[in-house]
Amino acid sequence: APDAYVVLGNGQINAIASGHGFRRYVVVYSDLFEISGAAREPDALAFIIGHEVGHIAAGHASYWRQLGMFLVPFLPILGSSLIRSQE
């Protein structure tokens, strides 16, 4: 199971899954709890964390995958399609 963290959102509403080596983690931005309180609902929070854990299970959190996805926006036409398909 990945570690889970809540970090200061600074106005951003997001959650991410990442890691390196055998360590994986999910980060939820604090603004998800503050703005409209959507993540305060247990089902909504479970959905958000489940979505991020799905990225880990699909291999989207690997170092090489994330490095590749960092470079994808520079590919004309194909870049945005690859990003959306991962989501």
Image (spheres, helix red, strand yellow):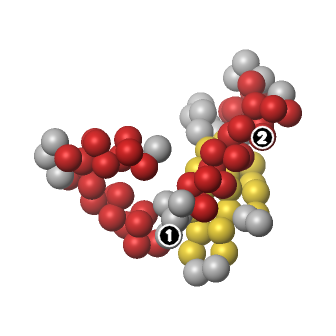
The residue beneath circle 2 is 46
Q: Circle 1: is it few (<14), some (14-19), or many (20+) Cα within 10 Å?
A: some
Q: Nearer the viewer, residue 47 or 40?
A: 47
User: What kind of residue is marked 1?
Assistant: Ser
Q: Which residue shows up at 52% across the image and 65% down it?
A: 59
| Rendering coords of residue 4 (x, y %) | 76, 57
Q: Circle 2: is it few (<14), some (14-19), or many (20+) Cα within 10 Å?
A: few
The residue beneath circle 1 is 62
Point out which mark residue 31 bears. none
Above or below residue 38? Residue 6 is below
Q: Can you tell which quarter of the image residue 38 is in? A: top right
User: What kind of residue is marked 2?
Assistant: Ala
Above or below residue 12? Residue 83 is below
The residues tagged by marks 1 and 2 sit, at their Cα atoms, a distance apart of 22 Å
Q: Element type at marker 1?
A: loop
Q: Nearer the viewer, residue 9 or 75?
A: 75
| Rendering coords of residue 77 (x, y %) | 16, 42
85 lies left or right of 52: left
50 lies left or right of 10: right
Q: Which residue shows up at 33% across the image and 64% down it?
A: 68
72 lies left or right of 84: left
Q: Which residue shows up at 41% across the image and 66% down it?
A: 65
